[in-house]
Amino acid sequence: MVFTAFDYRTQEEVERPPELMDIPVLTDVCHLSNLIDSLRPWATREEVDQAIEKLSKADLCKIRKVAELKGWHDWEDLLSEVLLRALMGKRRYDKSIDFVTFLIGSMRGMHSNNKEKSRKLEQLDPAYDLASREKRVDERLQDEADLAERLQLLGDDPEARMLFLDLACGMNKQEIKLKRSLSDRKFAAIMKRIRSKLSGRNDHKGGT
Amino acid sequence: MTDNKRDSEELENILEGLADSVLELSDQEILDEVRKSGADPEEYAERTRDVLRLALPKFDRVNRHLQHLGHAIMDWQAQEESYESRCKKCGLSVSFSATSNEIRGEASVKPCQANKSQKREAAGTWCRRDIASR
């Protein structure tokens, strides 16, 4: 609960009975984000430590598996940096969020930021136009080859190929299930076959 | 959309979908899947925990060092290659590189000036009181 008292300058000026003194008061809408920030249950260093120790074997396997499937070859650096940022206060851990979700979400964010940063740095290079054109052609060929290779790895499995192409189009699980009339179980079984066939490919070669 | 962007997005969509599907697996399913890929789930998982644990001493070392000098550090700002901050009390700056583990800046070598003057003030008050009471 938060009181709003825009006619006052500070929360100390707002008279309240003693039992309501613990409730924060917002006196200026500009302070709203700071107030929300101060109310979030940020984890302390000790709580982050406890969260790490509480991770189960399955949780830890999931984190690494996601990183490998995404083709993050620098996953150890990413994970370490995510945790350091959580401790340093740059991207703190809100205890109300599942720790695995927080770690993977932060790794995703950091990976895409790093990609964006290196793209911007490339554009600052005076030789960008010529070099980038060549690079774009190379990347395009590489992405085409990656997609074709992955599709080939699925072999003669029409269901897996169908789902693969649906995913490529940007469809999510619900959309695919609806379009293909698949149950949860059937969808999961096909995804498992895709992961199994592509896992060797993703462990060793580049993703995005 | 250019062909290049489309191919890269298609690949990203697929990897995203696969990654999401892993998060939906039960504990037993993920352990089976790791085992099936030829890895030992125990070792596979512990490597991840080790990476997480390694970040903690880095953070502790920086904090201990700065606290020892009397500084109270504000939230760190992540820069290109390092983290930067200032002491809340004296304003001296400090930077920390997570890759080289180096701590730099005035706050990393000089004691907190605000702490010093507070101590001096406290000592002065005590002396004055002490003299007055005699």
Image (cartoon, coloured by chain):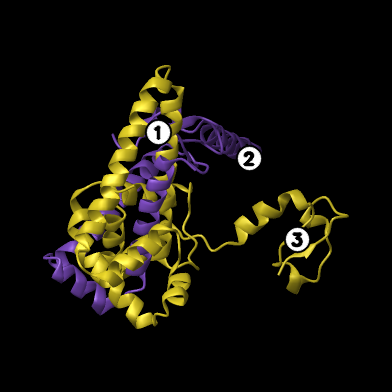
Chain colours: A yellow, B purple
For numbered disc 3, what is the local secondary structure?
A: strand
Q: Do the numbered discs 1 and 3 sit on residues whose CB atoms are within 8 Å?
A: no
Q: Measure how far apart labels 1 and 3 are at the Cα level.
A: 43 Å
Task: Please check whether the numbered discs 2 and 1 fall on a single chain.
Answer: no
Going by the numbered disc 3, the residue's amino acid type is Val
Please give left or right for residue A49 compared with residue B123 in the image.
left
Q: From the viewer's perspective, is residue A142 above or below residue A7?
A: above
Is residue A161 visible to us here? yes
Chain letter of mark 3 equals A
Q: Kindly identify the residue that appears in the image at 80 percent across and 71 percent down.
A: A17
Total marks placed? 3
Mark 3 nearby-residue class (10 Å; few <14, some 14–19, many ≥20): many
Q: Position of residue A181 (x, y in %)?
A: 42, 80
Give the residue pinned by disc 1. A118
Q: Measure how far apart labels 2 and 1 are at the Cα level.
A: 63 Å
Q: Kindly identify the residue that appears in the image at 77 percent across and 65 percent down.
A: A3
Earlier residue among tags 1 and 3: 3
Where residue B40 sits, quadrant-wise, is bottom left
Give the residue pinned by disc 3. A25
Please give left or right for residue A38 compared with residue B53 in the image.
right
Q: Position of residue B49 (x, y in %)?
A: 25, 60
Q: Measure how far apart labels 3 and 2 are at the Cα level.
A: 41 Å
For numbered disc 2, what is the local secondary structure?
A: helix
Which quarter of the image is occupied by the N terminus of chain A? bottom right
Q: Position of residue A29 (x, y in %)?
A: 77, 52
Q: Residue furthest right?
A: A7
Chain letter of mark 1 equals A
Give the residue pinned by disc 2. B129
